[in-house]
Image (spheres, helix red, strand yellow):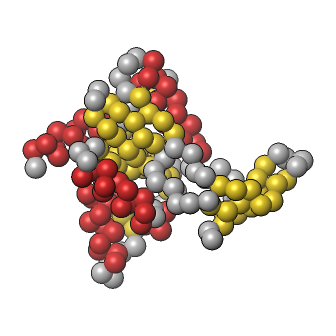
Amino acid sequence: MAYWNSRGLRGSALEEIINFTNEYYRKRGLALFQKVPTPITPVQVDNEKHAITLAYFEKESTVDYIGVVQGIPVCFDAKETAQNFLPLRNIHEHQLLFMEDFRRQRGLAFLLVSFTAKGEYYLLPVEELRRYWDGAAQGGRKSIPYEAFSQDYRIFLQNGGVLHYLEAAALYLEKTEES
């Protein structure tokens, strides 16, 4: 049984931005996304702070968000890194497999990655993630270097804090339709 030992809300800054963005998209009729909760059972609770300090995962989670953009199913996971690379250990195999299954059903699947030290955001298609995953399995590097993230998929904060990732997702869709 897998356990979670709280080290704070890792990734919460990016998720706050994404949640704000998703609400912005919903209100404008552009897209509809749902945050997928991680099923946990608390083991220890700090009653003074009203916080869970130790819990176990009830089952494997899939991705952070699932939704639809003008009829196109989309799923993605949010990842933050303070390094100049994204460690592959931050991605679980069951997440990768879920995203690949999602793609086979003609949906879009990707990571939204925040390089916190640079203040930059990128969309990483699941196909690119698979390439690095397979390379690591064959003895290659265990991370995706910053330089591997395409400037075509760079995402900018706009309109008072909206992380407008739909532009990058549209480009990803366009490129997948070409192949």
Q: Is residue 51 above or below residue 160?
A: below
Q: Quadrant of residue 107?
A: top left
x and y, in percent, of residue 167 in the image: 29, 33
Q: Quadrant of the N terminus?
A: bottom right
Which residue appears at 44% of the width and 33% of the height? 33
Q: Is residue 75 above or below residue 93?
A: above
The reply, left or right, for residue 54 in relation to residue 171 is right
Q: Residue at x 32, y 30 (%)?
A: 69
Q: Quadrant of residue 144?
A: bottom left
Horizontal relation, residue 53 to residue 117: left or right: right
Please report the residue visible at 35 percent of the width from the left and 54 percent of the height from the top. Answer: 99
Rendered location of residue 163, percent (x, y): 43, 33
User: Quick check: 42 above or below 120?
Assistant: below
Residue pushed farthest bottom? 139
Residue 28: image location, x then y, percent: 40, 17
Q: Would residue 73 appear left or right of 172 to someone viewing this image?
A: right
Q: Is residue 57 visible?
A: yes
| Circle count | 0
Q: Residue furthest top?
A: 28
For the question of whether residue 147 can be seen, the reply is no
| Residue found at the far right of this picture | 48
- Which residue is more in the foreground, 6 or 40? 40
* Front residue (pair 102, 47): 102
Which residue is found at the position 66% from the left and 66% from the top? 3
